[in-house]
C-alpha cells in the first residue's frame, strides 16, 4: 500500500483567497473565531500542529482585544481577515478599541522560578513564538490592526518530493 498526499497540497493556486468575517467583541465569540481560523488554516495547507498554534495565537490575541481594547465590554467588533497565498496564511485582526502596542510589552522573564512568575503576561510571548511574523499598528479613527503570518510548508511535486 502506498501513501498519496491529498491532491490539494499539489500545485497550490497562485490567486490568493481572502475572506473577512466580523465577530462581536466578546468572549462568547472566541469559539466561532477559532472555527473560522482553523478552517482557513486547514485550507491553507498547514499541518495539524501549525493549525493548532495559529488557532491558539488568534484566540490569545482576540482575548486580549476583548480584555484590553474593549475592557471586557461588548462595545465593538473584531474583524478577522484570512488571506491564503502561495507561501502561507496571513491573519489580520482589527478592532475599534483602545490602542495597545504589543511592541511596548517587555518579554517575560522565563528564567525565574515558576512560583514567582505572574499568572498572566505570557500571551504575547506565545503569539510571537507560534507565528512567523507579528505586526501591530494603530490608525487614528480606524483602530488597532494586528497582522499575524504563518508560513506553510512547500508544496509537493507530483512525485511526492518537496520542491527545492
Image (cartoon, helix red, strand yellow):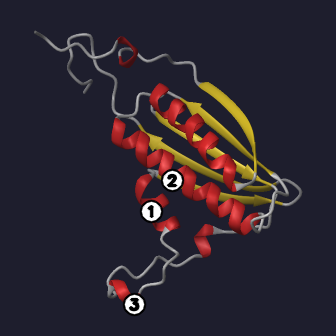
Q: Is residue 155 above or below residue 110?
A: above
Disc 3 secondary structure class: helix
Label 2 sits on residue = 57
Judge whether residue 42 can be spotted in this image.
Answer: yes
Q: Where is mark 3, residue-wise?
A: 116
Q: Are marks 1 and 2 in contact (CB under 8 Å)?
A: yes
In the image, what residue occupies the spot 48% across and 79% down?
A: 119
Q: Are marks 3 and 2 in contact (CB under 8 Å)?
A: no
Q: Quadrant of residue 36?
A: top right
Tell which tag, 3 or 2, sits nearer the viewer: 3
Quickly name the residue at label 1.
126
Rendered view: 95 above or below 8: below
The answer to whether residue 93 is left or right of residue 44 is right
Q: Label 3: few (<14), some or many (≥20) within 10 Å? A: few
Number of marks present in the image shown: 3
Q: Residue at x 59, y 70 (%)?
A: 103
Q: Nearer the viewer, residue 159 or 163?
A: 159
Whether residue 54 sits left or right of residue 153 in the image: it is: right
- Secondary structure under the numbered disc 2 in the rendered image: helix
N-term-proximal mark, 3 vs 2 = 2
Q: What x and y, as percent, mark residue 1?
A: 10, 9
- Labels 3 and 1: the sequence-earlier one: 3
Camera-side residue of 20 and 115: 115
Measure the alpha-carbon separation of dots 3 and 1: 19 Å
Amino acid at each position: 500500500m502506498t501513501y498519496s498526499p491529498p491532491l490539494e497540497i499539489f500545485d497550490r493556486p497562485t490567486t490568493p483567497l481572502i475572506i473577512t468575517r466580523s465577530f462581536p467583541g466578546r468572549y462568547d465569540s472566541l469559539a466561532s473565531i477559532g472555527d473560522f481560523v482553523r478552517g482557513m488554516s486547514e485550507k491553507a495547507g498547514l499541518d495539524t500542529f501549525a493549525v493548532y498554534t495559529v488557532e491558539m495565537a488568534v484566540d490569545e490575541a482576540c482575548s486580549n482585544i476583548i480584555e484590553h481594547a474593549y475592557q471586557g465590554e461588548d462595545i465593538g467588533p473584531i474583524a478577522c481577515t484570512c488571506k491564503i497565498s502561495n507561501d502561507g496564511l496571513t491573519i489580520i485582526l482589527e478592532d475599534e478599541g483602545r490602542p495597545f502596542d504589543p511592541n511596548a510589552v517587555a518579554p517575560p522573564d522565563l528564567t525565574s522560578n515558576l512560583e514567582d512568575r505572574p499568572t498572566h503576561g505570557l500571551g504575547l510571548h506565545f503569539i510571537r513564538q507560534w507565528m512567523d511574523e507579528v505586526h501591530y499598528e494603530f490608525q487614528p479613527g480606524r483602530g488597532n490592526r494586528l497582522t499575524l503570518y504563518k508560513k506553510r510548508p512547500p508544496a509537493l511535486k507530483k512525485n511526492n518530493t518537496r520542491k527545492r
